[in-house]
Amino acid sequence: MTRKRGRKKKETTESTSEKRKVSVAHLVLKSIKSIPKPLIPALITLIALVIRLIPYRLRYPIGYDPYFHLAYLEYVTEHGWANYFPYALGPWGFLINHFHPKGMWGAPYVIYTIGKVLGLSAYGAFKLVPPIFGALTVLALYYTVRRIHSEKAAILSSLILALTFGHIFRSMANYYRGDNYALFWYSIVLLFFSLALFEKNPRKKTVLYTLAGLAGGFSSAFWSAYYIVLVLPLFVALSVSAYSFMRENRFIDALLMALSTGIAALIASAMGRVLGFGMFWEGNWQGEQLLKLTGIKPGPLEDVYLALHLVIILPVTVLIIGALWALKSKVPEKLKKIGTAGTLGIMALVFIGLLWKYSGTFELLSAGLTTFGGAATAEMSKPEWWDIKTAYHVLLVFPLLYPLSLRKPRLSDAFALGSSLPLIVLAGYWTRFLFIGSLGLALLGGIGGAEILKLTRENARPLGALTLTALLLVGGYHSVKATYEVKPIVDEHWENALKYLSDISNENDIVLTWWDHGHWVTYFSHRAAVAQGTPSELVSKFYLGKTTKENLLELGVDYITVSFDTMLKWESVKATAGRTNGYVLIVMPFVGTYGDTALFQNGNYQAAVRKNGVAWNVLVNAAGAQFIPKETWIEDKNGVYLANVTGEKAGNAYLYVNLNYGYAVLMDGDTFKTPFARLMFTNDYPQDYELVYTDGGMVKVFGLLHPNVALVREDEPVLRFENATGDTLRIYGYTDNGERVFYQVYNVSGMREFRIPPDVKGAVIRYTYLKGDRILDRGVFRRSDGWS
């Protein structure tokens, strides 16, 4: 009897617990249902916007590329829309229309123009734009999913996208990237597609598909790689046509979807003439290479890809749709599955044939984004599990529920799969595409979540809703936390160093720095860097001592930076210079003290340093081998100096210890001899270099001593020769579009300065200062609109 009572009591407790869970779930459902429906999309959009505004508080932009975009935006707000921008890629300058269409900076410029009356700065507008477009993408997804499926699926899909860190990261304040624009415009294309697909009025249907084409074309105004917005809708068209072959005849929709991308291509060509073309413009090197690969001339379109799209890709897609349409009425119902498989096989063969013929196109696309066509940056590498987990977290569960929708395949499934699967495939290719993949995962995930609610029994539905809510909360917490913890790479050390460089240098001076830091130089110093945005073999070879001073003079280099951050990229420095072996450099952070001994460690490498009167006791442990380095250099508040170390020294080991910031660097002899090491770790460097700035171990700036040409702005620009030993000056004049309209050689032997003659044509002046045939200095500047 006692046992039975105990069991009954236990069952009663469990029942009470279940009832409590159900009541909580009912409460959650009731509170959600109490929200007026028109407010739901607005609230979700607000949630998306608020999360993406979290990094607005940060002092600096995140990453590297945003600094160039911000620098150019600030320049145009002060000086107007200059195309030939001399504050990048010295000594040649930078043509903006060879980079991105003007809409890339036009959106924040418009917001700045509107908001400046309220005190909004150009930087403030710059920070606002990514969250705005990110939140609008969420809103577009809501209405798309609501049209193709249900209100519940729309709420879930838009919430998943709003809360997914994979989407937040590239659409948040302070991280300004062009693919945010592309995904927004693709979401608008999908919205118009969804409205048109279920529109019965033929005229309205045609108008909606035309609007989709216009949206796809407008994407060309914002990002040089916008072509993805022309290609992705074709997969939706093919998916709908495959569904039409198997079931309901919707070939007209599939055909109009495909043809809308033709409208987009024509709009892109028209807009390119005003705002600039994309990366495959015939004036770009990628466009020239694509022309060689395909043999397709752009003609009046002026963009090689647009011609390829209209001449090859779109017609092939239309032919496939037409073939399915023609076969539908001739293939018996029982054979349609076989027919579908056969048609898909033919499609695969056709596309494989195109890939075979135009395979270089895709390599070229990679090369256009990575310079070497490989994983030059972390975002161009294949995503690991850690990347996927960080991007999607538990929200990844939602798309796994989507197959529930395929119990009875519908037209909406064809739309959803055609829209989402290509995005998910892209997400597996590069880590940067985890952002694009987030839209596909959210679209499928919302439908999957709605389907599991539909399958859940009435009495258990609240628990299902509570489970999905918990997943959203956990995923949202992860994303909010990850967004809050995002930190800029740049810091006060770089800002102070580069602003100091701006104060002491001339407007036309050129800086050699690691390519990651080039955009920082443009932004903080308003100076041109030799390399920025893409890896530079020359910069790497300079750091390793594989160049000459003449190589630097030919590029007009006036200043050089070395830094702690470059040390952390040492393997990349070696790889970019073509060196896979040797040049050992191991950074060891400070880990604590033992008595009066400072300890530094990185894995199996340790260094112990202790001051003993005027001498130093130093011991290194490298994977069990203990020794005293041949030389030990110390940097503290008194500067950098060679330490007096007691004991017998090893032959090929050198140590640098920074007591200002707490790190040590162990290196071999090859590394210690490099210009980078001599400048960063010692006070024993060639007399051609002069230390002009140091913060004691994070960033150091050196001047290169040479016959320098300094720009002085008077009524007409004046070139002043410092250490004037040259005898020849070449002057080149260019229009704002980069067309050379002037060239003259002047004898400047014995002259201290040269005033640019009024008859020199061009908005931009480039010069070369020589002694005989030897180049002493080079540079570029705008004739007016100086930027100090």
Image (cartoon, grey):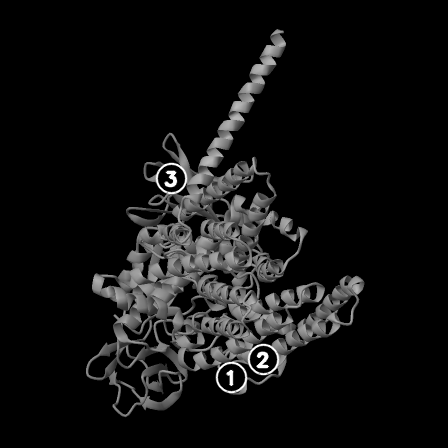
Q: Are marks 2 and 1 in contact (CB under 8 Å)?
A: yes
Q: Residues within 10 Å of mark 1 (few under 14, many from 20)?
A: many
Q: Nearer the viewer, mark 2 or mark 1?
A: 2
Number of disc labels: 3
Quarter in which the C terminus is drawn: bottom left
Instruction: Give how far apart the Cα atoms at labels 2 and 1 are.
Output: 10 Å
394 relative to 710, above or below: above
Please name the residue that numbered disc 1 is placed on. 301
Residue in front for this viewpoint, 45 or 93: 45
696 relative to 231, above or below: above
> Can you see residue 653?
yes
Q: Judging from the image, what secondary structure is the residue with disc 2 in?
A: helix
Please name the residue that numbered disc 3 is placed on. 616
Residue sitting at x 52%, y 59%? 147
Q: Are marks 3 and 1 in contact (CB under 8 Å)?
A: no
User: Looking at numbered disc 3 in the image, what kind of residue is underneath it?
Assistant: Trp
Q: Nearer the viewer, mark 2 or mark 3?
A: 2
Does label 3 or label 1 sit earlier along the sequence?
A: 1
Which mark is drawn over residue 608?
A: none
- Residue at the left extreme of this rendering: 715
- Residue at the top extreme of this rendering: 1
Q: Judging from the image, what secondary structure is the residue with disc 3 in?
A: strand
Residue in front for this viewpoint, 48 or 782: 48
> Can you see residue 651?
no
Residue sitting at x 36%, y 71%? 106
- Quarter where residue 589 is shown: top left
490 relative to 89, above or below: above
Which mark is drawn over residue 310?
A: 2
User: Looking at numbered disc 1 in the image, what kind of residue is underneath it?
Assistant: Leu
Instruction: Give how far apart the Cα atoms at labels 2 and 3 are.
Output: 73 Å
